[in-house]
Image (cartoon, helix red, strand yellow):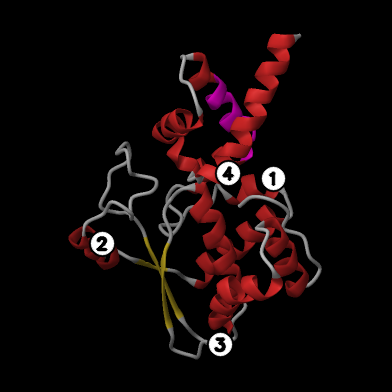
Amino acid sequence: MSGPLNGETQEEFWSTRAKQHKRGSNEYQSMVIDELNQIAASKAGYEFNLWFEYDVFCQANSWFVYSLLSQLSHTIKVFTVLTTHLEQGHKYFWNGFGPATPEQLRACFNNRIQLTKKDLALGNQLWQAFRNRDNNTLQQLSKQQSPAFPYLKDIVEAHLDTERPARVINEIVDTGTMGFENTFSAFWKQESIYGFGDVQLKVIYASVMHERKQRKNY
């Protein structure tokens, strides 16, 4: 979700991502590439159940997986498992698998949605637009309707509003909230749609605090 996504070949792309995560080639190979290569090694009739949450972080990663699945020449079944046990507005709505009970997880699985070829193609198109920073295409794709992408418009809008995270952090700090941990907690309550981890948000937070300090000194 963060950092460069360039690379003319798949190998160059992996190298770009390994550098982004500060991992050596061998470590990244075993941690990520070998795992994802199992998709290409699948056989006809395989079934994939993808457990991705609604938030921007998870959806961007799911689009990449859809792009890999769409390249397979053999017939497979692909299902998306969503946090259908939660209603919109619930505090865990966007990221609800972690705190879910075994019974709730079973309910999510039972409500899984099988993707059509059109859905897989849409996932691949979303990934290509996301990777190429083609915001116009991404916005157009977000208008498509599919039960496999139930909150696509909200997700794309959040992603394209690049100033929103910094703006929200500024608003939180303006309330008197002190320190990154408290800001992180407040941000998650308000903007869990992004699915940011602490490392991702810390970069934005540091930038915001630097700008605030400069304005104060000025």
Residue 151 included in the magenta stretch of the image: no
Q: In this view, does 35 lie above or below 14?
A: below
Q: Is residue 7 above or below residue 200?
A: below
- Of callouts 1 and 2, the N-terminal one: 2
Check disc 1 and report the residue beneath it.
135
Q: How crowded is mark 3: few (under 14 residues within 10 Å), some or many (20 or more)?
A: few
Check disc 3 and report the residue beneath it.
41
The mark lying in front, picked from 2 and 4, is 4
- Of callouts 3 and 1, the N-terminal one: 3
Start and end of the magenta stretch?
160-170
Spatial CA distance of label 1 from label 2 is 34 Å
Check disc 2 and report the residue beneath it.
105
The mark lying in front, picked from 3 and 1, is 3
Q: Main secondary structure of the magenta part?
A: helix
Q: Which amino acid does label 4 sit on?
A: Gln
The mark lying in front, picked from 4 and 3, is 4
Q: Is mark 1 on a helix, strand or loop?
A: helix
Q: Which amino acid does label 2 sit on?
A: Leu
Residue 168 included in the magenta stretch of the image: yes
Which residue, as the protein is rendered here, is positioned at the far right?
Answer: 8
- Of callouts 4 and 3, the N-terminal one: 3
- Of callouts 3 and 2, the N-terminal one: 3
Residue 200 tag number: 4
Q: Is mark 3 on a helix, strand or loop?
A: loop
